[in-house]
Amino acid sequence: MRRKTWMTALTLLVLSSLMLAACSGQAEQTNEKTRTITHEAGKTKVPEHPKKVVALEYSFVDALDELGITPVGIAQENKTDVSGLLGKDIAFTEVGTRQQPNLEVISSLQPDLIIGDFNRHKGIYKQLQKIAPTIILKSRNATYEENIDSFKTIAEAVGKTKQMDDRLALHEERLNAAKKKVDPNDDRKVMVGVFRADSLTAHGETSFDGELLEKIGIENAVTKTAEPTVTITLEQMVKWDPDVIFMAEADPKLLKEWKNNPLWKQITAVKNKDVYEVNRDLWTRYRGLDAAEQIVDEAIQLLQQK
Amino acid sequence: MKDMRRILIVTVLVFFASFALLSVGSIQLSLSDLWQSFFGGKDAFIVQNYRLPRTVLAFLAGASFSLAGVILQSVIRNPLISPDVIGVTNGASLFAVLTIALVPDGPLLLTPIAAFIGAALVMLALMMLEGGGNVSRSSFALLGIAVSAICASGTEYLLIKFPLQTNDSLVWLAGSLFGKGWQEVMILAPVLVVIGAILFYQHRQLDVLSLSEEVSIGLGLPIQRTRHIFLALAVILAGVAVATVGAIGFIGLIAPHMARRLVGHKHLAVLPMALLLGGGLLVVADALGRGIHPPLEVPAGLITAIIGVPYFLYLLRRERTA
Amino acid sequence: MQRKRLIFVLLLLGCLAVYSSLFFGITQMNPIHLVQEWISGTTSKAGLVLTNLRLPRLLLGLLLGANLAVAGAIMQAVTRNPLASPQVFGVNAGASFLVVLSLLVFPSLGTANLIYFAFAGALVGGVLVFSFASVRGMTALKLALVGMAIHLLLTSLTKGLILFNDRITNVLYWLSGSLSDASWLELRIVLPWSLAGLLLAASLAKSLAVFQLGQDVAVGLGQKVTRIRLLAGISVVLLAGVTVAVAGAIGFIGLMVPHITRRLVGEDYRIVLPVTAVIGGLLLTYADVLARFIAYPYESPVGIVTSLLGAPFFLVLARRQMKGGLR
């Protein structure tokens, strides 16, 4: 009996002392002026001019770069992701993957703003908040418009709204210019697909690239989907029968197998040899303004090269 | 007395190891840095907000799984049983993933509660299917494995049907302490303390139950009721543990075994030893997960599986009865 | 069950399976039109879907279902354990793991070459489970426990691989077992290996009776038993391995079907094996049809359907085992 009571008491003692120690170690609040930003997970008081920003999604990095801010910490999977996104090398600390950012590393950077993705990071919003003011915005699996909204919020958060507005105006201009280049009589429907050895995903009209293309007048063959991106089969592709296919990843083995498949050859895009390989990172993973403009240019160029 | 000494030694070892392992992580700390961080300074935030609660939680969860394992093994009289084998862990996972899928933006406490309900339902189902009869044959274990498989299939189905909502579940399913903090500790600690106390006070009943049935009856124990109560305690422990840290397996299997090897079969000694070893194991697994490949984290559940399975197989080879 | 009745029922089920597998799906098909087409020699889109997707899919389903069922039947006979099946024995998990690993290391490996990795994995998984479970006598429980442990180990390792490699997250879908990209090419690849496995199994049919005579007699026959075990093992690896390589890890068929068959036709493996093959093929085909409709218009992995069907079956089996042993 004695041993049990002793052990229980010891455990309780240790636990309570630890908790006391923990409570005294909360992050200090600075007295800097703040701005309240409304985002997908609520409202956060963000310092007026954040200097050290941690970005947990590539589109956010792109937006920050447009505003002249280099994040101190970025979450990335492949070493070339960020340099590919921005077209240049920047110095930053890797804080883990986008899927699992490392809280310790983020906190060691002592940031004053963290920007997370709604799809991936809303679960750890509270933990991120403990480190620094955090805003959660939509990027992954969101529509083009939602992504633009996210950029606007980022601009608001770092106090550079005017700069973003200018950039967005420029973006609109470029899109409109692109739209003019699109032949109004060209009613070909396109499909953006990711063709991997083990799966087929189509980006529908509500996905980032899908909506973007719709905006400049290029219609999407993949309509009325439950989610912006969906897993599909060859049969479904045949049903939708796109006139043009942009392959955002093309597994060579798969293509070889299909080359001889009469169903594949039935698809209008294949019949007209309107199947183009495009860069997966650019088209589906980056979701930035630069990326969007490049996608649009590439799409038009490919569509009109004949 | 020999047991008491061993328990004390292990206690000291586990506490020192846990303390030292606090230094492991993406930001590697030296022991003196670690000591400093308790009082403030640049590492204080990391240690006090991440490592400390994680380590405490790991200890508590490991201890919970371990005690649940002790109960199951004694009551069902099969040393190869544990909460994961019997389906409690998978049932908890299933319900947790179900809630995440259906109510992705629900309150934070919803998932743990759902997980607990899942665990309880599995146990109830098992007892019903068993026909309310004797709970101590290997058949019960077989049933548990079957139910476990069903829950696993169900979970897999949900993961595929709701891939975006259940994105995080992958990590959660492997069992991980990523992002866990004092909140989870507060949920688990009282449960463990209360049930642990009950177990310690009733250790003799456990001794009796783990003997043969005739002896138990002969000693006047109201078998059915007692068995069911203990099983319920095991489920609560395991269920709440899964609710807080996800489906971490093998601790409930290995720790009781190791405990018995060190201090024999008397529950008076086995219970505290299993508690310590289980807690220590998970602390080590979590530390390994943090330190293997920073800044990436390997979920602790993956590590316990990779270490646990070979040990389990080794146990099987040595086991005389199955 | 009377032979004539059985054959009749199987034929009926077979026709239903063929019809539903060929004509159900997202592409609208009118059988009458299609027949007219066939006669007149024209092709429409629906017709192409029929000949290029549905037909190979049906055949593949029948073949792979037969593979799995026969593999399960052999395992149950040789180990005299009613729970034996490629899934429980870790054969599926082993094959899956090695396939995922090879997809990572050699991303452009064709299906034809993936098969070798699947075989290797199937072998490793099966051998591991077999050796650990048979220490000091294999009981149903021990087998289930070891199988579960190995399965858990391999799936954890596989999950680990997936977690750290963003590129292959979709492999989860495939891992659950899917027939959605069945094609003539796959059928061609699978056919020789399946036939080899099935023929090998057929040649063992008479010998499998040896195992039913009991452990002691089997030991007395010594050498012969080892040889049969070896051949059986090869057959299982071929059958399960090729199935996993092409369609992922489809569970429960190898477990359920032999039981159903034995209840229908008794214990003579010369009859059990072919009937098992047929029922296995039919079951997988039906499961595949279901898989097309659970989440219409999107497809679900067929492995999920077999799990949903098979898991309760497993439960009933475990319950029976409890009440006094099955054979």
Image: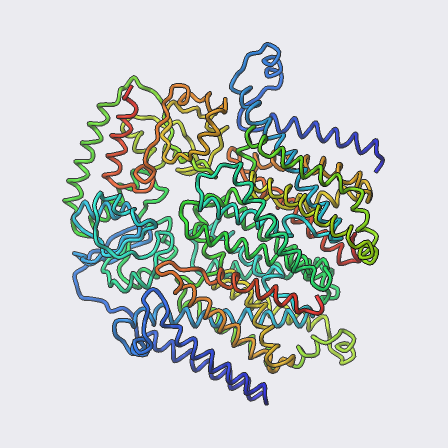
Q: Which residue is drawn at 32% across and 74% down?
A: B30
Q: Residue at x 50, y 73 (%)?
A: B279
Farthest residue, direction front: C223
**In which quarter of the view is residue C149 placed?**
bottom right
Q: Is residue C106 above or below residue B135?
A: above
**In which quarter of the view is residue B57 placed?**
bottom left
Q: Is residue C215 above or below residue A12?
A: above
Q: Residue at x 54, y 54 (%)?
A: C154
Q: Can residue B203 be seen in this view?
A: no
Q: How is the image coloured?
A: rainbow
User: Residue C254 in the image: x percent, y percent?
Assistant: 67, 45
Q: In which quarter of the image is the C terminus of chain B?
A: bottom right
Number of callouts: 0
Residue in front for this viewpoint, C49 or A240: C49
Q: In this view, does C43 lie above or below A116?
A: above
User: Residue C225 in the image: x percent, y percent?
Assistant: 77, 51
Q: Residue at x 44, y 22 (%)?
A: A267
Farthest residue, direction right: C2
Q: In this view, does A64 lie above or below B138?
A: above
Residue in front for this viewpoint, A89 or A167: A89
Is B235 left or right of A258, judged from the image as shown? Answer: right
Q: Quadrant of the N terminus of chain B?
A: bottom right
Is C176 left or right of A203, judged from the image as shown? Answer: right
User: Residue A34 in the image: x percent, y percent?
Assistant: 19, 59
User: Residue A19 in the image: x percent, y percent?
Assistant: 38, 76
Is A152 left or right of B237, judged from the image as shown? Answer: left
Q: Is residue A78 visible?
A: yes
Residue in front for this viewpoint, A270 or B126: A270
